[in-house]
Amino acid sequence: MLIYIVKRLLLFIPTLFLVSCLAFFLKNNVPSDPVETLLSLQGVDESKEEFSEAYDAKMIEMGMNLPLFYFTIQSQYTSWLDSYEEENSTKRFATELANKKYKKTDILKLISTISQLQDREKRALFICQHPQEVIERLNRPQLASLNADTKSNIRSIVDEMEISKVKWHYPNVSWHGLKNQYHRWASNFIKGNFGVSLIDAQPVFKKVWGSMKWTLILLILSLTIAALVSFVLGIYNGVNQDSKFDRWSNSILFLFYSIPKFWLATMMIIFFTTVEYGTWTNIFSSVGDWPATTGFFDIIIESANKLILPILVIVIPDVAYLSSLIRASIIEENSKEYIKTARSKGIPKRQIILRHLVPNSLIPTITLLAGVIPGALGSSLIIEVIFNIPGIGRLMFESIRMADWAIVFPIIMIVSTVTIIVFLIADILIAWLNPKIKLG
């Protein structure tokens, strides 16, 4: 057992590493500039002379001047950047263009032309990530002072760059050690330092943890209820196969399992939170503001009436799914020879069910239950949005809508970590319940 747990933990590390790499590189390829965003939140005006210095200082503070990863597979047309010594904004501009396969001579020619402009104009152009963006910025009011010849010269350089882009290359591998952006980002994540929001500059950990409590309450209550109801219903239907109750309940459960959660949530709100269809249907509190309390149990007590509907929306399809699987497992186990032998020996039915039938039927069910937990965590996004619950699902939805990627990717990492841990616990429970299974 111990060897198996160690093996699973060793698998846990590369899985989480691959997920973190995916989240990190997605974070670095979204169409936004976190440095510029944070400076604007701090009140640093882009048109002021000190913006360039502040931009470079913030880049160094955030570690964005470092290489992206432990090693870099560079192309022939970007290898010259290692020895290119300029201020951060200029080198960053050169790097952006080089990564897009523009030639070194063309890039340096464009940089040389822009460098002859005034500081304010240089800052406005060196922030660009593409030559076409340079052309677009030439029409902005802050660059209105540029004369027509200069603008024409820049446009002609950009046109030449597009024509003479690199067509082929050979790779160069460079090792950067631990001083890279990924290592810094992953280390901060392990320490709980997720950075700050790009919307209000609030610590990401504070916002995520404040929302996590609501999601945990929703999941713990819904999964506990779903598991209890499913086990009772599944075991009863499995033992009493083809009874009248079994047939009716299976039909109803199949119907509930077929209903999408977002549609069920919408119908619940329409018919059970308003007086539009009669005063008798106005049973629950309408979807609206939730209490600002921070205590775990205080949230449950003060929001009990509002939590009933979202919990029902999560519970009903999960009960339909789990109870059907438990029923099938009970029926399969009930047909085995050792159960027939136990009956022939006169062992009471209750004892057979509790000591033999149920424990052996739980083994496949635990694996399925482990899959329900991450699924419930994922479905909480739409449920929290519909019911306006301030959990991580709604926080992630709002962050994506507002392009606050500093919050989105830590949530992805948290959900991935929880999913891996849940499946690890499920495997350990299966090995504990049935030592005959040789795992690994």
Image (spheres, rainbow, N blue to C red):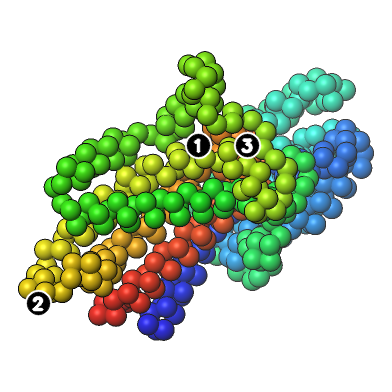
Closer to the camera in the image, 303 or 179:
303
Q: Which SS class for mark 1?
A: helix
Q: What x and y, as percent, mark residue 186?
A: 63, 63
Closer to the camera in the image, 268 or 193:
268
Q: Earlier in the sequence, mark 1 or mark 3?
A: 1
Q: Residue at x 64, y 53 (%)?
A: 297
Q: Is residue 30 visible?
A: no
Q: Nearer the viewer, mark 1 or mark 3?
A: 1
| Residue denoted by label 1 | 309
Are circles 2 and 3 on residues that touch, CB within 8 Å?
Answer: no
Q: What x and y, as percent, mark residue 60?
A: 79, 56
| Residue denoted by label 2 | 345
Amino acid, disc 1: Leu
Q: Is residue 342 above or below residue 74?
A: below
The residue at the far right in this view is: 49
Amino acid, disc 3: Glu
Q: Nearer the viewer, mark 2 or mark 3?
A: 2
Picture disc at residue 11:
none
Closer to the camera in the image, 341 or 368:
341
**Viewed as shown, does residue 267 lie left or right of 212?**
left
Q: Earlier in the sequence, mark 2 or mark 3?
A: 2
| Residue denoted by label 3 | 398
Q: Is residue 254 above or below residue 146?
A: below
Amino acid, disc 2: Lys
Q: Residues within 10 Å of mark 3 (few under 14, many from 20)?
A: some
Q: Residues within 10 Å of mark 2 (few under 14, many from 20)?
A: few
Q: Is residue 304 above or below residue 387?
A: below
Q: Which SS class for mark 2?
A: loop
Q: Quadrant of the C terminus?
A: bottom left
